[in-house]
Image (cartoon, rainbow, N blue to C red):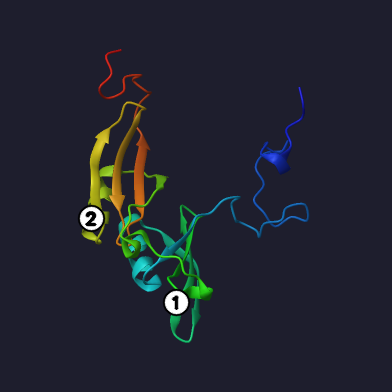
Amino acid sequence: MATPDPDHGGPPADGPRTGGSAADPRPAGVPWLTPYLTVRDAQASRVFYEKAFGFAVREAVDDDGATMHVEMTHRGELVIMFAPEGAFGSTAKTPRSAGAEAPQLFYLYVDDVDALHARAVEAGGKSLLPPGDQFWGDRFCQIEDPDGCRWGLAHKSKGPTGRQPGSDN
């Protein structure tokens, strides 16, 4: 059996690395993958994520009074970064601005799915799927944020039932 190769998807022999070492190309405390979203208004998105999900700002960069880049954490870990439409010469649009459904869903584990679902709706999110126990064992709901990004909020509630909706097994 080959030794896991941490540079090609395998775990390092001594556990996960947190970044910042000479052998690690990431800054300290940065995960291997962090979604970078395009938003319509960085300040409004920052407020939504704080109120809806309890995210905290790790870093925010302003240019001439406009917020151009934000990094946010959940439970002390970097989970998203974002910049407004047009930042840094980008032509990227939010799903809402493009008139399209977001093709991805950000799956976030939380302590209380029902409470965060209610908070997210109160903060301006749209409920796509109310909280419910799912066949794979999570209590789960879906929220669409004001920019049209989809968020799945989950809490491990029990083991998988093995029964998918509509199946006869």
In the image, residue 29 lies at what x, y percent? Answer: 61, 56
Q: Quick one: quadrant of the C terminus?
A: top left
> Within 10 Å of the Cα at label 2, are there few (<14), some (14-19), or many (20+) other Cα atoms?
some
Q: Residue sitting at 25 percent across and 61 percent down?
A: 123
- Badge 2 element: helix
* Mark 1 and mark 2: Cα distance apart in space: 24 Å
For the point 34% across and 51% down, the residue is 150
Q: Quadrant of the N terminus?
A: top right
Looking at the image, residue 15 sits to the left or right of residue 157; the answer is: right
Neighbour tally class for label 1: few under 14, some 14-19, many 20 plus, Cα within 10 Å:
some
Residue 75 image position (x, y, % from top left): 46, 52
Q: Which residue is mark 1?
A: 67
26 lies above or below 154? below
- Residue 62 % position (x, y): 49, 79
Please name the amino acid that badge 2 sits on.
Val
Q: Are marks 1 and 2 in contact (CB under 8 Å)?
A: no
Q: Looking at numbered disc 1 in the image, what kind of residue is underneath it?
A: Thr
Residue on which disc 2 sits: 121
Image point (35%, 40%), residue name: 154
Residue at far bottom of view: 64
The quadrant holding residue 160 is top left
Q: Earlier in the sequence, mark 1 or mark 2?
A: 1
Question: Residue 42 appears in which quarter of the rendering?
Answer: bottom left
